[in-house]
Image (cartoon, grey):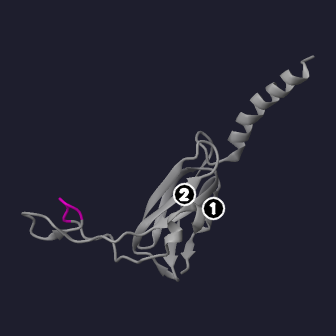
Amino acid sequence: MFHKPLRRWLAAVLLIPAMLVLSGCGSGGPTGDVSGKVSFQGKALPSGRIIFLCEGGDKPVLSSAIKDGEYSIQKAAVGHARVTVETFQFKQVPVPGAPKTSNLPGSDAPPPGPYVPIPQRYRTPDSSGLTYTITKGQQTKDFDLTP
């Protein structure tokens, strides 16, 4: 019915979108709510950020603040993701006219929590070694970082 080159082209045109949908962690499909705890050497991280870098679909990046060791990401696309974790050292900055010192100019908010330095490898997806496959619905995933 079709010539061989045309069949290959048609198969490729139909197969590539199907592979993208099946690869997961893209947009428009089922989602999951992921929450959990992040600790370093068994102790909850007081503050920081966790980032999920999806490997399929349009490769969305999902992040959540870590507060008292806990994080929560809502409506994450289903699929495999690489994970990174960061902590930040806040410095007290004097703000002219403010009664107290602040973390950021124009803010009287206290620091989000004591700074806990973690190894630099957790900041990048290629070296963190952290992954998770997001599934449909609510789920819990804890991460315990090591030195």
Residue placed furthest toward the top: 1
> Viewer-proximal residue, 30 or 43?
43
- Say which quarter of the image contains residue 9: top right
Query: Which quadrant: the N terminus?
Result: top right
Q: How many marks?
A: 2
| Residue at point 54%, 47% (across, down) | 60
Amino acid type for the residue under numbered disc 2: Phe
N-term mark: 1 or 2: 2
Q: Position of residue 113 (x, y in %)?
A: 34, 74
Q: Amino acid at mark 1?
A: Tyr
Give the prevailing secondary structure in the magenta stretch: loop
Give me the disc on residue 52: 2
Using the image, determine if residue 118 lies above or below residue 136: below
Q: Residue at x 23, y 63 (%)?
A: 104
Q: Is residue 106 magenta?
A: yes
- Which residues, given as a range, are shown in magenta? 104-108
Q: Are marks 1 and 2 in contact (CB under 8 Å)?
A: yes
Quickly name the residue at label 1. Answer: 132
Mark 1–mark 2 Cα distance, whole angstroms, equals 8 Å
Can you give x and y, in whole percent of width and height, for residue 86 in the image? Answer: 45, 67
Task: Say few, some or many: other residues with alpha carbon within 10 Å of mark 2 (under 14 / 14 to 19 / 20 or more).
Answer: many
**Residue 16's image quarter?**
top right
From the top left corner, tell me how far across and down residue 29 is, in percent. Answer: 62, 42
> In the figure, 79 relative to 140: above or below?
above
